[in-house]
Image (cartoon, grey):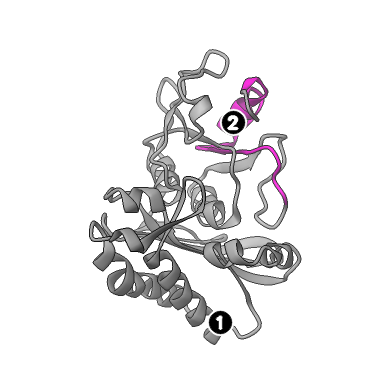
Amino acid sequence: METDDVLTLLKDVAEEVVNPRFRALGADDISEKRPGDLVTVADHEAEARITSALQRAYPDVLVLGEEATAEDATLLDRFRSCEHAFTVDPIDGTKNFVHGSPDHALMVAELRGGDVVRSWIWQPQHERAYVAERGAGAWGNGERLVRPPLGPELRGVTSRRSWIGRALGTLKVLDLTWVCCGVDYPKLVEGAADYALYRRTKPWDHAPGSLLLAEAGGSVGTFDGSPYRPQSDVPNGLVSAADRATYDLVQSLVGALPDR
């Protein structure tokens, strides 16, 4: 599939499956995979449609969908060793979606040989499309994205509640993210924050945005200083930063965080 074809697929699925349920979910449309981890009928239907289209285009590919993995944990094991794969997050920010927030997104990433080579983020309520291709740049609604210069003070964000309000060394205290990687990473690229800290590192959450940020001049790596690779286990967490110098600084300070 051409890059534009995948973006069109996400837009079509959003229009047909996701948007009609936005602020219109019934009680029977929402369930929990684990306590507090919400999933909706829109998640399941969107993932099924996206997965089916990708498998028709690439019969031998492995598609790692968030909801499929919740039902079959062996899918993640197979993903870690496969040569060609896609990750699918049918509605990133499901809790936001359930609560009526426009901060949610449909996300796909393509990996070859363990590297993310293309990625797509579609924010249906904001009507923003973010596309990246390894070595070819990052794009927002068709315009080339370059991370703007840092301000006088670094702004850090995190979705981990026990880290919010804490400061790393002399840096400003951590604020809350937009609680959706499909919004967080574009915000980092556009300069709304300078770095983000994550404890959870699921491939479908971070593969798309990590390429977008890297192609715009940013840097994503683990708490232990290793480069981020979605097919590898990341036991401690991720630093997603505006540039390499910011990553190096923040990574050197994360050891002071609780509940790592």
Residue at x-position 30% and y-position 48%: 99
**Which amino acid, mark 2?**
Ala
Return the x and y of residue 217 as percentages of the image width and height.
51, 45
Where does the image place residue 107, in percent across and percent down from the top left?
45, 61
Where the C terminus falls, by quadrant?
Answer: top right
Using the image as rendered, state which of residue 141 and residue 168 is in the foreground. 168
Identity of the residue drawn at 41% across and 20% down: 152
Q: Residues within 10 Å of mark 1 (few under 14, many from 20)?
A: some
Callout 2: SS: helix
Q: Which residue is mark 1?
A: 55
In the displayed orientation, state which residue is furthest to the right.
81
35 is within the stretch colored magenta:
no
Q: Is residue 87 left or right of residue 233?
A: left
Q: Secondary structure at mark 1?
A: helix
Q: Is residue 179 above or below residue 246?
A: below
Residue 238 falls inside the magenta stretch? yes
Task: Give residue 193's position: percent from left, percent from top.
Answer: 41, 34
| Relative vertical location of residue 241 with respect to residue 186 in this rendering, above or below | above
Q: Are marks 1 and 2 in contact (CB under 8 Å)?
A: no
Q: Tag 1: residue type?
A: Gln
Region rendered in magenta:
233-257
- The answer to whether one can see residue 225 in this image is yes
Q: Which residue is under mark 2?
A: 245
Q: Residue at x 51, y 46 (%)?
A: 35
Q: Residue 73 appears at what percent x and percent y?
A: 67, 62
Q: Is residue 116 left or right of residue 145?
A: right
